[in-house]
Amino acid sequence: MTTRNTTITVEVEDPAGTFTLREICERGECHAEFVIKLVSHGVITPVNEAPNAGDWAFDLEALARLRRAQRLQRDLRINLPGLAMSLDLLDEVRDMRREVDRLNRLLANFMAD
């Protein structure tokens, strides 16, 4: 009997909504100052370019990056510029792994034919 492992990756193309600065702080369990610092260092990006932080809106991806940034800062004590670079590199690794998986599936299908 052969065991076959299947990995399913789901990407949310159109998240259901956005979060205000207050809502992302509540969901991320952090202060607005921290979120504002993350935005200023390019760690997370609001979906709109409002000059006033109170008018910013954040998507689901920003919330996920906020949580990853918190874990990196807590566990590895990485400073804010380091967080931005680390998260960008982690995103790049994730994208490359997805591409390798996609190419491996194509190759497996090609070899099966």
Image: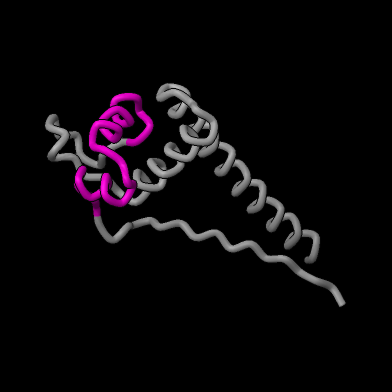
Residue nearest the observer in this picture, 56 or 31: 31
Task: Locate the C terminus and report the quarter of the image it occupies.
Answer: bottom right
Residue 51 position, x and y percent, is: 13, 29
Q: Residue at x 18, y 40 (%)?
A: 56
Which quadrant would the N terminus be assigned to in this image?
Answer: bottom right
Above or below for 80 versus 93: above
Q: Is residue 66 left or right of residue 57?
A: right
Image position, residue 106 (x, y; %) = 69, 56
Q: Is 30 inside the magenta-drawn segment?
A: yes
Q: How many marks?
A: 0
Q: Residue furthest right?
A: 1
Q: Main secondary structure of the magenta part?
A: helix
Q: Nearer the viewer, residue 24 or 31?
A: 31
Q: Is residue 19 left or right of residue 113?
A: left
When asked about the image quadrant of residue 97, the answer is: top right
Front residue of 109 and 32: 32
Q: Residue furthest bottom?
A: 1
Q: Which residues are magenta?
A: 18-44
For the point 69% across and 58% down, the residue is 105
Q: Colour scheme of this structure image? A: one colour
Q: Quadrant of residue 109?
A: bottom right
Q: Is residue 70 left or right of residue 47?
A: right
The residue positioned 42% from the left and 22% from the top of the image is 81
30 in relation to 3, above or below: above
- The residue under the point 34% across, 24% down is 41
